Amino acid sequence: MCQRFTGMLAFINTFIPCFSSILHPVFQCITQANTSKEFNLTPEAISAIELVKKIISDRTILYNPDYSLPFYLVCDSSNVAAGGLLYQVDIFDRTPEGLQKIANKYGYVPDDISAKQPLKMLPGVSTGKNTTIIREFMTNPDLVEKYDPLSLLDNKKTMTEKLEFLKNKIPIILPIEFKSKTYTSSQIASYSTMEKEFISIILMIQAFRPYIEASRITYLLTDASNVLWALKYKNSTSKLSRQLLKLYEFSANIAFVHISGESNMADYLSRMVVVPDSTGDNSDVEG
């Protein structure tokens, strides 16, 4: 019965943030049952099931992709799972006419048009740093500037200039799909932090391959600067070299862009979430 439930959830996992992390206790119970032939749900697994039931009963908005806009794929990894969010950004002028265009196109007006959170999801908005961009895996590197109309990836501009310009804009974040995947026990035990970060990028690119290959350009955002170094210089361990070869399978324009850790929206998708225990108290499970 539990396997049927998780199998059903697999059909709608793209609507469930932290899917793999939330159900990690349940998957552990199923794995142990396959070994010991006895199935027992732990209190953590029961709480995880209740939590995911609550999530799927809430309203979650995902948007259909607009292939005239660039895609943004933000990835991150924890010790137990990889997570990713594919989204697009539609930008409007911060004027009454701009607000009317948002209402006409999306049927609502943002409650707080001064919120800073959407700005953190734009590549190039990273306090105090020049933006590292890896173009080695692009068939047309010039597309980076073409699909950056706000010039946020222009390192000649200071962060103050970029933020001043964005004061007159309203970015609308359009989530398309969530993905998360738990690592195997051998991967958890044998892979370093850098290797897990690298593998998380490969897993998310493979998961979103249909979108990426159909898009004009995809900006892949990561806070793992060491992984960007490995991508640029292609001088890494044999494990990473094998994973690196998988990137050459794609005939797509993927620009790898560095973002600050606090801007990484995929961070929580790869973390173990807070699951209430049987007593009703909350216990943090470290990812």
Image (cartoon, rainbow, N blue to C red):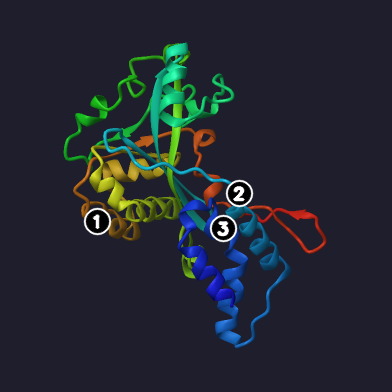
Residue at the spot 26% in from the left edge and 56% down from the top edge: 246
Q: Do the residues labelled 1 and 2 touch (CB within 8 Å)?
A: no
Give the amino acid type for the residue marked by disc 1 in the picture: Leu
Give the amino acid type for the residue marked by disc 2 in the picture: Asp
- SS at mark 3? helix
Q: In this image, 104 relative to 150: left or right?
A: right
Q: How far apart are marks 1 and 2 (CA)?
A: 40 Å
Is residue 221 positioned above or below 38 on the image? Answer: above
Is residue 226 positioned above or below 208 on the image? Answer: above
Give the amino acid type for the residue marked by disc 3 in the picture: Ser
Mark 2 or 3: in front is 2
Q: Distance between the residues labelled 3 and 1?
A: 28 Å
Question: Percent position (x, y) of residue 130?
Answer: 39, 24
Mark 3 or 1: in front is 3
Residue at the spot 47% in from the left edge and 12% down from the top edge: 96
| N-term-proximal mark, 1 vs 2 | 2
User: Callout 2 environment at 10 Å: few (<14), some (14 to 19), or many (20+)?
Assistant: few
Q: Mark 2 points at which residue?
A: 58
- SS at mark 1? helix
Q: Which residue lies furthest to the bottom in this view?
A: 37
Query: Quadrant of the image for the N terminus?
Result: bottom right
- SS at mark 2? loop
| N-term-proximal mark, 3 vs 1 | 3
Q: Mark 3 points at which residue?
A: 21
| N-term-proximal mark, 2 vs 3 | 3
Name the quadrant containing residue 33: bottom right
Count numbered badges in the picture. 3
Question: Percent position (x, y) of residue 271?
Answer: 57, 51
Q: Name the residue under label 1.
A: 245
Is residue 152 positioned above or below 174 on the image? Answer: above
Question: Percent position (x, y) of residue 235?
Answer: 29, 48
User: Callout 1 environment at 10 Å: few (<14), some (14 to 19), or many (20+)?
Assistant: few
